[in-house]
Image: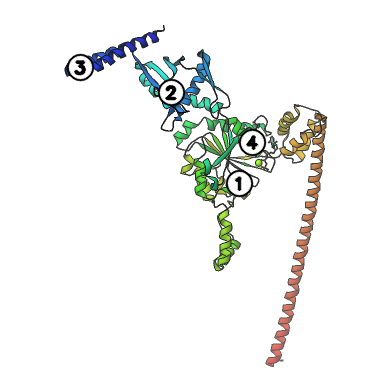
Amino acid sequence: MTAFEMWSRLGSVMAGLMFVWAMFKDYFPPQLRSHVEAYARKAVDQVHPYVQIKFAEFAGERLERCETFTAIQNYLSGSASAKAKRLKAESVKDSKSLVLSMDENEEVVDEFEGVKLWWSSKPVLSQKPTFSLFSSAEDRRFYTLTFHWSHRELITGSYIEHVLEKGKAVAADNRQRKLFTNNPSSNWGHYKGTKWSHVLFKHPSTFDTLAMEPSKKKEIVNDLLRFQRAKEYYERIGKAWKRGYLLYGPPGTGKSTMIAAMANFLNYDVYDLELTTVKDNTELRKLLIDTSEKSIIVIEDIDCSLDLTGQRKTKKQEKEDDEEKADPVKKMMKGEEESKESKVTLSGLLNFIDGLWSACGGERIIVFTTNFVEKLDPALIRRGRMDKHIKMSYCCFESFKVLARNYLGVESHPLFARVRLLLKETEMTPADVADNLMPKLDDEDEDACLEGLVEALEKAKEDARKKSEEEAKAAAAEAEATAARAMAEEEAQQASSVEKQENGGRGCAKEVKENGVL
Ligand SMILES: Nc1ncnc2c1ncn2[C@@H]1O[C@H](COP(=O)(O)OP(=O)(O)OP(=O)(O)O)[C@@H](O)[C@H]1O
Ligand SMILES: [Mg+2]
């Protein structure tokens, strides 16, 4: 019998005595009663100086599984699986592997800042007969934490917080990540219809497989790491714990691939927000509130999503609006069309990014992607809103080396030198390079793939040369035409001024003649 068990038994005896006292105490005078009770409590504390806290698995009227219980279970899954002899394997919701927890009536010892404490797991069976298929609240499990009363402050103050934090971190590492997309609001609320639908996120892209200049890649990885560890920093400076990234560049340069790599690196969920299906700013805010922490919110092709390129009306739009006001039929037709369209405005989106509501929950990254950064309103992408602007460029030699390793498993090859030269002379996206590196036939080996790439690069170079020649020719022709037009205009002007002079002279002569001076 361990010392703790011995104390426990003694404690039970004392508890029994207290029970008997409770039954007969009314036969004693009040003064004597209070003396006896005070001494008895002291004696119990001496004999059984341990405090116990119970954590139930289910709580509330609807018997929802307690987050605290799950966090403790996750925390104990580490130490329990190492120390307990009888374990229980459970599949927990959203967890990608089985969670090992100690079996019923098992006990494990934990240590915190040099203090020993005991965790035990016990089912409490209901005394009431039940006819339900589901067990009642009473026959669910409890975790019991036992510790010496002298450590009460340490345990209730910091240990429990430490357990919950660690437990949540274990759950985050173990959880299956999800890729969400927003549902149209007409589906919200019907038959458990939610604002977001999801599938499991299983994109294989990582920063190792992402083709990018190494120094740029390192900078981004460091930035993400700094962000992830900066909870206290954001609290201290009074800023919501979130960061905005703008990824811009031509199609096929790896913007979406980069988002997947970020999510895999940070172990975050991804919320792919389709702005065109969001009816208005209120809906946008509701969607934001419904996202979880540790997530990346993505708006792809932001320049195409909505007319967010500016709030000012053009002259043409102003004229159309005036015409509509005058014609009620036109106005009605436009109203019907508009009701289907999204009414999210630039200011709504700005509020989404850094308004008050954006601070409802931390650790979130917002990513915008675009092919045409120059089309965006500067307010949308100013620093502080989109903290980091990342240009995704055409394939450089370093990026090619990553792709060659990914696709062909080669680190070096005699054709690399040729590829290096060609990549300097021509622009090809990583997507096109990757496509050329993929074997098209079963028996195509790395030599054939690299030769194919060299050919494609040479062709791209030749096409670019021809195109620039044609453009130069067209520009020269345009310049010639402009010069000819300018000359013709000048000649015409000269001719008209001569004519005017002649007409002026003739008019003068006529006038003189008429006045009879001649
Ligand atoms: N930098 C890269 N590293 C690794 N693979 C890449 C990279 N860029 C492109 N690819 C490959 O090309 C495909 C297309 O890339 P991706 O969808 O990421 O481009 P994008 O920049 O998002 O294009 P778009 O602007 O059209 O959305 C990817 O599936 C990936 O296989
Ligand atoms: Mg993309």
Query: Do we see residue 517 in this rendering?
Result: no
Q: Is ligand 2 within 8 Å of the beta carbon of the residue shown at mark 3?
A: no
Q: Is residue 305 above or below residue 38?
A: below
Gap in angstroms between the C-alphas marked 1 and 4: 16 Å
Label 4 residue SS: helix
Please state if 162 lies on the left or on the right of 100 as rendered. left
Q: Residues within 10 Å of mark 1 (few under 14, many from 20)?
A: many
> Element under label 3?
helix
Judging by the rendered image, the residue that carries numbered circle 4 is: 258
Mark 4 lies within 8 Å of ligand 1 (Cβ measured)? yes
Q: CA distance from mark 2 to mark 4?
A: 49 Å
Instruction: Answer with mark 3 or mark 2, whichever residue precedes in sequence.
Output: 3
Residue 114: % across, % down: 42, 14
Q: Could you tell me which residue is drawn at 45 percent across and 36 percent down?
A: 237
The answer to whether the residue labelled 4 contacts the one labelled 3, judged by CB atoms less than 8 Å apart, is: no
Q: CA distance from mark 3 to mark 1?
A: 77 Å
Residue 148 lies, with reference to residue 203, above or below; the image says above
Q: At x 74% / y 40%, what residue is drawn?
A: 428
What x and y, as percent, mark residue 482? 75, 61
Q: CA distance from mark 4 to mark 3?
A: 74 Å
Residue beneath disc 1 = 302
Q: Residue at x 58, y 27 (%)?
A: 96
Q: Residue at x 39, y 16 (%)?
A: 147
Between disc 3 and disc 1, the foreground one is 3
How many angstroms separate mark 2 from mark 1 (CA)? Answer: 53 Å
Above/below status of 232 relative to 35: below
Q: Are marks 2 and 4 in contact (CB under 8 Å)?
A: no
2 or 4: tag closer to the N-terminus: 2
| Residue to which mark 2 is pinned | 139
Q: Is residue 71 visible to us here?
A: yes
